Image (spheres, rainbow, N blue to C red):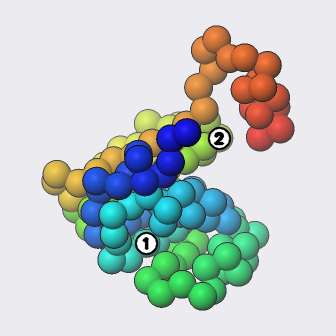
Amino acid sequence: MVTPQDILGSISGGRVLDVATGSGTFIHFLLAGLNNYGEIIGVDQSERAALAFGEAFKDYQGIDFRQMDAAHLDFPADSFDLVCISNSLHHFVDPKTILLEMLRVLRPGGTFLIAEMYCDEQVDTQLTHVQLHH
């Protein structure tokens, strides 16, 4: 079985941005896999996400939530070492705008990480996961 460490273990996170973070589920994957990190910021426009995120990471140092629109990130250009999004692009009407905004805040040479469900040639268990997700 492939572990988060197998996938991310060679990456030093530095300053990390998780876009459309929701309750921060993907951040747990990052924590289990990244070589290290300095700061992790999760952004989502949902108030409900803010509450769930706050509860999930209340005992962690250097992990914060900011409520904002992913299409208009309130960060300077080139301000993150790793920018990621997980299982969220398919929810956006204009994913290209989101991706371009994520690239804007990624420093040159940084890591851009996308984890997304695919839709081609899915087996029944994958289709069930998609249906539950939606």
- The furthest residue to the front: 1
Is 84 on the left-hand or right-hand side of 82?
right
Viewer-proximal residue, 59 or 10?
A: 10
Residue at image x 33%, y 47%? Answer: 112
Q: Which mark is residue 40?
A: 1
Q: Position of residue 32 (x, y in %)?
A: 49, 62
Q: Position of residue 53 (x, y in %)?
A: 65, 73
Q: Is residue 93 visible?
A: no
Relative vertical location of residue 98 with respect to residue 50 in this rendering, above or below = above
Tell me which numbered mark, 1 or 2, is placed earlier along the sequence: 1
Name the residue carrying label 2.
91
Viewer-proximal residue, 18 or 34?
A: 34
The local crowd at label 2, few if under 14, some if 14 to 19, many if 20 or more residues have their Cα within 10 Å, is few
Circle 1: element type? strand
The local crowd at label 1, few if under 14, some if 14 to 19, many if 20 or more residues have their Cα within 10 Å, is many
What count of labels does the image hold? 2
Viewer-proximal residue, 70 or 57?
A: 57
Q: Is residue 17 visible?
A: yes
Is 39 on the left-hand or right-hand side of 120?
left
Viewer-proximal residue, 15 or 94?
A: 15
* Amino acid type at mark 2: His
Residue at image x 50%, y 41%? Answer: 2
Residue at image x 55%, y 76%? Answer: 65
Q: Quadrant of the C terminus?
A: top right
Q: Position of residue 46 (x, y in %)?
A: 69, 65
Residue at image x 34%, y 71%? Answer: 37
Relative vertical location of residue 23 with respect to residue 129 in this rendering, above or below = below
* Amino acid type at mark 1: Ile
Q: Quadrant of the N terminus?
A: top right
Q: CA distance from mark 1 to mark 2?
A: 23 Å
